[in-house]
Amino acid sequence: MKKVCVDARMLVHSGIGTYLKNIFKYLKKAPIHWYVFIHPHQKSAYFDQMEVIPISTPIYSPIEQIDFTRKIPPCDLFWSPHFNVPIFPIPSKKRLTTIHDLFHLAYPKLLNRLERFYAGFLIKQAAYRSDQIITVSHFSKSELCKYTNIVADKIEVIPLAVDLDRFSPNKESHQILEKFKVKKRFLLYVGNLKIHKNIQALLLAFDVLDKQGFSEIDLVCVGNSKDMKRLDDSCIKETLQHLKHRIHFVENVSDEELVSFYRTAELMIFPSLYEGFGLPPLEAMACGCPTICSYAASLPEVCKTATLYCNPYNYRHIAQLMEKVLVDEDLRQQLINRGLKLTRTLSWEVSAQKHLEKIDQLIDPPNHRVAMMQ
């Protein structure tokens, strides 16, 4: 039986955690002996029938490199679902790495000097040491080639998907609104508040919308707000003060609550400047929520014709499109229909199958199979 070790410590994170949960739903059924790295506090029930290896060292810390050398068992393949790869020799015949985006190299000025150096070092190590790299969009593949000089043949593009059992346009009660003290009509943003997510432009656009007479609509921002302190522009502060009773920053939302937000929102806006893929717009679409997205990075590739594209550098354009969707019922319904159609073409099962094919190819390459048969 093939032996594969995977670092699953980011299962509890958003983004990469969503990727791991959905992929493993199918991967764990494969005839593979899985070794799984988890944090000691993670629930191991999710990894039934897998051999769990607890690692307590923090992700990205230099000391995790020591744990890698100590705890990776002899195996056919070691899979890193992020760029924090082992840099020292390990007892694995092959290495597979998933790199979702190149934000750390594309926007180095948004990181401190240590973050910039360590992330750049690890990404280049991942490109150099991996036998194969999986990424989630052709945009990210082009970024990998641009920033690491890796050959394109070494990179496999496998798109992400949406769990349609969880994200669906079922009718929703308004209990979620009462809990978070939100008005019945609201606009929605989902994602963290890091600078490249461009929340500044969204807040300014919301201010413009308010001045145009849309005073009965709130704005809900769902996600980790630890980077709010970086929104220190005086104009942003003024906007937050002027509209603070109608702007809701919501953290620690359960899976069910997130779905409820998508289902009850008038519109979801995603003005990000940089995304390797961008799952939140697709999740919104699957719930029957119309979307406005930035035309930057991977988003046109991912969202295709199912969204309205805004200029992320022009908050007045964002406001203009927000107003358009709010008042044009035909356009709104078109976006809903296109979004539902698009998300039905994506499948985590297909994505997982492509991962398994790549694992099989690395462990047992086609030319090796031919030689064995002769």
Image (spheres, rainbow, N blue to C red):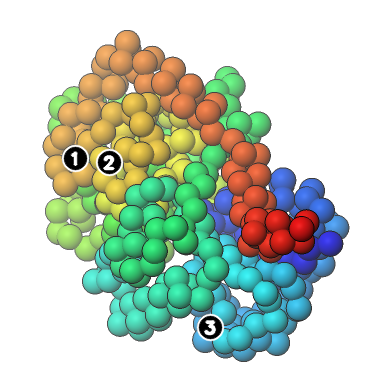
Where disc 3 sits, the SS reads loop
**Mark 2 or mark 3: which is in front?**
3
Where disc 2 sits, the SS reads strand
The amino acid at mark 2 is: Ser
Q: Earlier in the sequence, mark 3 or mark 1?
A: 3
Q: Earlier in the sequence, mark 2 or mark 3?
A: 3
Q: Does the rendering let one see residue 293?
A: yes
Around disc 1, counting alpha carbons within 10 Å, would you say few (fewer than 14), some (14 to 19), or many (20 or more)? some
Q: Nearer the viewer, residue 323 or 346?
A: 346
The amino acid at mark 1 is: Asn
Where disc 1 sits, the SS reads loop
Return the x and y of residue 223 as percentages of the image width and height.
45, 51
- The residue carrying mark 3 is 87
Around disc 3, counting alpha carbons within 10 Å, would you say few (fewer than 14), some (14 to 19), or many (20 or more)? some
- The residue carrying mark 1 is 311
Looking at the image, residue 169 lies above or below residue 155 = above
Q: Are marks 2 and 1 in contact (CB under 8 Å)?
A: yes
Alpha carbon distance from label 2 to label 3: 36 Å
